[in-house]
Structure formats: structure tokens, C-alpha cells
Image: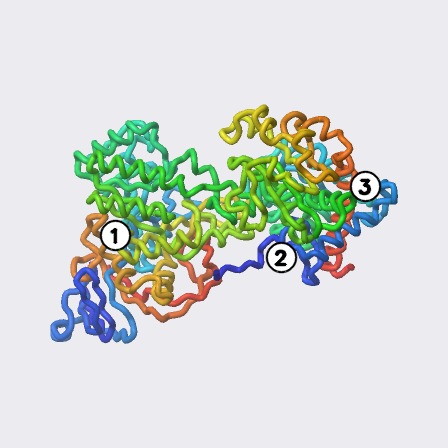
Amino acid sequence: MHLSHAHTPSRLQLNPQGRLRHFLTTEGLSREQLTEILDFAESFLDPDGAITNQPLLAGRTVMNLFFEASTRTLTTFAVAAKRLSADVVNIDIAKSSNSKGETLRDMLWNLEAMTADVFVVRHSQSGAAHFIASQVTPKVAVINAGDGRHNHPTQGMLDMLTIRRHAGDFSKLTVAIIGDVRHSRVARSEIYALQTLGAKEIRVIAPRTLQAKDFQQLGVKVYERLEQGLEGADVVIALRIQNERMESPLLASPEEFYALYGLTPEKLRYANPNAIVMHPGPINRGVEIASEVADGNQSLILKQVNYGIAVRMAVLALTMQGQLTTRGEG
Amino acid sequence: MNQQRILLHGGRVIDVARSIDRITDVLVEGDRVVALGAEARAAEYTQQQTITGCLVLPAFVDLCASLREGEKQHGSIASESKAAAKAGFAHVVLPPNPKLVIDNAAIVAQIQEKSQQAAQVTVYPLGALTKGLEGKQPANMHALTQAGCIALTNARQGMANDETLLRCLEYAASLNLTVFFYPEEPSLANGCAHDGFTASRLGLPSIPRVAETIALAKQLLLVEETGVKAHFSQLSCKGSVELIRIAKAKGLPVTADVAMHQLHLTDAAIDGFNSLAHVRPPLRSEEDRLALCAAVQSGMIDAICSHHQPLNAAAKLAPFPATEAGISALETVLPLGLKLVREGMLTEDVLWRALTINPAKIMGIEAGTLHRGGGVIVVDPEKAWSIAPETLVSFGHNTPFLGMMVQGKVLELFR
């Protein structure tokens, strides 16, 4: 149509040289750009998987703006920033502020004036990180730490790193994502990244109430039965079911969800015998996944957390570089 | 009233209500054409204008425009009447909303007074169907219509239950009043975008088509039950067209309109979280858009409205779901309509019918034709202009068509 797409997230997150200057979504980035993030993240991992510090953000200020409560993501971003020698400021807005448009803009400008270099943003509304990136000066990099149902790109990329390290070549992999796809920002980030990285097949498995409308147009295969969806899968990702869904018309009960879609050792046998199991956490044991699977030898759930720090270090450093190029300091 | 007699020379005169479409001279006196052709030339006139290449049309009639009276930060009757007049509209229907609850004669009088002070267009309030728009008890419908409301509506506010709706419609039917509906089931409308691929990709809470069709189906059944005259405004999907087709085939006293932007845009317009395309009902699929265009062309949808909703800049500056829905639309109706004609989606006579005589008939006013005193406009259909904050008169610059070059401008409104 006749509308300008100059403001699409995928454009907004690149500087004029085509380098990352915000990280808002995995959608629309090239395979080279995604691979660069993964390679850079790997560079922070020594052979046994431990993380090495690098002072790439010394003298820079990273502000964590969390409009929605989160302990894990906030902590891993703070740890990642500190391992890069950045000054870290955590601002817990969830408790104090209303997030109405103008107030939000005023607040951003105030924070910007305190010489922030990076905003790490979590917000309950889809598009919030994109909105914030469109409102701040070119001097601040915005990293999306989860916006509503839209994207959680660093989670998506840490899952890609996990897959690459433990399952190998994307082009040979069938990846099955189970659960609340409709409301999941993690699933969206994973799907866009998996497509760009050339995964052989991407499947989503959920009852119709938790499917996203017309998602097959994205090129994913949609399954309503767990057993069929798991058949021959190399990577199995269980999504978290938010507590609020339990008391909505979307689900009958946690027990029934577990009976139909819970990842138990028996169900997992439908997948490839070497399949890896992932979950973005926090886990609802006995709802999405059985403890035997979560803690079993196919599970990489704890590794994911560790890779999360490396990926966030990579994204912080890359977007900062992109900002510096934009500022002409690069 | 302007008692000048102006001879418009050399324009193409179009009045679909009277099957007139020819290049001729017309004599305009005040708000009407009093003579055509040789008769016009032979009469005395005070002024002559040559308008070669232009169209002479009845002034447009809009079935729905929010003028934001009482919401000064977004506009007012004064500001938006100016925009309407500039866009060729002489008659504008103003629906109630929770911020402008038109449920008593005093409010109606106040709206009329402000509209008269603005002296740009005639504003026709719709009265609230229920007291306070609360959906519980019928408003004083007789008093509202005596005060000047042309019809009643509960806007997008839900009804307490089906019985209340049934009784309100029975009551309206016994007073021979028309009821306007904006079909939407509230429990299915907790979203900000069409439930389709784009909303799925962007992770936006969505509103399925069935939110509209389930409400419309119910309302049509109650129209059949009560015999009340009903107008359905701002239909957004193919399924709604089907339901209207069935109702009309049964001979029910129903009419329908669609907002101009629904004939142009789909949910693809919200990509990139473009809040300027955030509107309710939401922009739907290409299949829906084509069905709506075809329904206007076939006459199944009787009229095109602006669904004008001016908003200040801050209303659109927030994460997409937190932005206010609405498009500042009055001033783009003519060029967008002409664009549909150029693209072969509508024939010209259908476009003019949908903007003049049909909405006038739905409202029951003497307008939409050249000789009845509903106003006359002169349109340059080729005049190119760019949709931009500088070129818009409305207080609201919130249009997804910003930056677009269009053709078609109203040069004059006689009223």
C-alpha cells in the first residue's frame, strides 16, 4: 500500500550503515546479523562454557527500565552489563508509574538527560520497545527485554545459541514449540530467528485457543496434538503458561493441559531420541513439563540461563557499537 | 442566508437523485440550485464564475463524525465543522459517546447552539438509546427527537441484557424512530487490531470478525422482531455484508454504511506498530476490503461515512495498544472516493449516491440533491494536493494517509 514502512521495527533497529543500533525484534534481520550475535556471544564463553569478562562498555551507562516485573531477565541483563564493565542503573517502574503515553515520553527524555547509553526495556504492551526507540535520541540504544506478546529477542537468541551449540546445523533441525503460542513473545522471537537461520521445519503445538490466528502464513506447521507435533522433532521447546491463562476461557485446567500437552518422558519418546529440551523459564512443573524431563539428561534449561548472559553481553556490546558509529565516535 | 444569485458556468452538474449528469450552467441561490442550462443563463444573477473542468454536486452528508465537543484537547464543534465544510460536507451526524452522553434535550440544544455559532455545517445529534448510555433503561426518546435528534443509538456501549435491547427497540418502533447500530460484542472486542496474520505477527491483542457479526446478527433478529427502522454503521467485514444481504432480502427496514478508510486499507497498514492506522472497528483483510467495496458498488451498503475521529498528537504517541483508536477522516473522503473510482472499484454515480442522497434519506433530511436546499458544492476532481498537517483544517492530524498525494478538492460550499 501507500504507507511508509520506514518505521518498521526491523528498519528502526539498524543504523544507516546497516548495523544493529537497537535490538527490538529478531524479525527482519539477516542471517549474517543473527549469526554475528551468536558468534559474538560465543566469544564470551570459554571452552567449558564459563563466561569471560570484557570491558567493552567501560564508562557507559546501561539503564534497566522494567515497566513489568521480572527478576530473572533483569538480573541477567544486570550481570551481562557488569561483565562488560558498564555502570548499571535498575529502575523499577512497575511499582511507581503509570505508563500513559506522554508521561512515558517525558520520563524517557529525563532519563536520557542523565546520559544513559543503553535502555533495556521490558513492558507489558506489544510495540513498547519500538515506540521507545522511536522516541529517544539517536544516542541511546534500546534493547527489548520483552514487550507484551510481541518479542523477547534476547531470549530468542539465547535459545538459538543453545540450539546451535547442542543440536548443530539449523538446516537439519525440526523444532517443535509447545504451548501458549498466542501470547508468547518468546515463541515469536524464536520463530523469526529460526526461519532466518534456515531451520528445516518449525512446528507449533497447542490447542486452538492458544494458537495465533493465521500463523501458518509465517511458514510454521500448526499441530493441535502433541504426539503428532513431536514426531521426529530434534528440538523441543515448552513455553510457560502464564497463571492468568488458567482462569480464562482459554484452558480447562492446569491438569487437563498437562494431560494433553505436558512434556512427560512418555510424550518425549515421540521426538527424535537425541532431541534437546528447552524452556524459557520460569517452569511450571507438572503443567508444561514433568520434573523428570526438566531435570533429565535431554534438558538444557540451566544452560540456557548461562547462555543468556553471553547473548545479552553480545547484544549490549553490538548495539553500543552501532550507536557509536551513528554518533560518529565509532 | 446568502441571497446572492451565482451563475456557475461550464461545470459538470451531477445530481444522482434526479439522474442529472451533464455539462451545463447552473444558478445557485443560497443553499440550492434554482435553475439549469438556458433557464439559468436567462435569469438574473449577481455574480458569475467559470468552473470548466469542475463538478457541481449536492453537498455531502456524513453519517458519522466525532467532533470531540467536550474533549477540547482533541477538537470541538467549532474546529471540526470547519474541516467538514472544507471537505464538502454540509450535514454531519454526531453520535453520542461516554464523554458526550446525548440523553437529554438540554445537551441537544447545546450542540445545536454551538453548531449554529460555528456556522459551517449542520450538526445532527444522535440521541442516546438508553439513559446515560448505560444500557439499562430507555432514554426519553420522544423528547430527544423533539429536541432535534434524527435517530437514537447506544453507540459502542453494551446493553445490560438482550431484554433491554428488545424493549428499547420496541419502544423506538412504536414512536417510528430510527436506531443506529455500531455492531460490536464487547466481550469479543478486547483488542486493538484485526484477528489475523498481522496481529499474530506483532503479538497484538485482536478483535475477531465475529465480534461484529454476532452483534449484527442479534440486532437484525431484533429488528425483524420489532420492525424498528435500523441503520448499521461502519461495517468492517465480508460476513456483515452477507448478513445485511439476508436482512434486505427479507425486506427488513435496514440500511448500512462503511467508513471510507475501510475501503482503502487492510490490517497491513498497522505493520510497524503504526498507530495512525489504529481504528475501531479495526482494519481487516483484503478479502473483507474487496467485499465492502463490492457491497457499496452493488448498493448493498447504502452509504460511505467518514467515521471522523480527530485526536491530538499525544493520543497516538504510546505503545500501539495504549494509543487511542481513530482516524481524522473528513478531509480525505473526497480524494479517497475519487481514487476508488479511478481504480475501478466504484463507479462515479455510486460514489456520489453514497455521499449525498443515500445518507440524506437515511437521516430523513432534505439534502443530497441540488434543488432541495441541502447545499451545493463545486469540486475540482483533478486538483492534486498532499495530505499533511499543513493542509488539514481538522484539529486532528491523525491519518494513516499522511504524506500521500491525492487528487480532488472542494473549491466551494454554498449553504
User: What residue is shown at x 38% (from left), y 66% (from top)?
Assistant: B343
Give, as a three-letter code, the residue at label 2.
Arg
Residue of label 3: A82
Q: Residues within 10 Å of mark 1 (few under 14, many from 20)?
A: many
The three-letter code of the residue at mark 3 reads: Lys
Marks 3 and 2, how far apart at CA: 29 Å
Residue at image point 54% right, 35% down: A207
Q: SS of the residue at dot 3?
A: helix
Residue type pointed to by label 1: Pro
Q: Chain of mark 1?
A: B
Which circle marks residue A11 in the picture?
A: 2
Q: Which residue is mark 1?
A: B359
Locate residue A118 relative to residue A101 in the image: left or right: right
Q: Secondary structure at mark 1?
A: helix
- Judge from the rendering whether residue B59 lies leftward or rightward of residue A41; answer left or right: left
- Label 1, label 2: how many angstroms apart (C-alpha)? 43 Å
Could you say where residue B169 lies in the image, as x and y percent from the top left? 24, 34
Q: CA distance from mark 1 to mark 3?
A: 66 Å
Q: Quadrant of the N terminus of chain B?
A: bottom left
Could you tell me residue B340's position as x and y percent? 36, 62
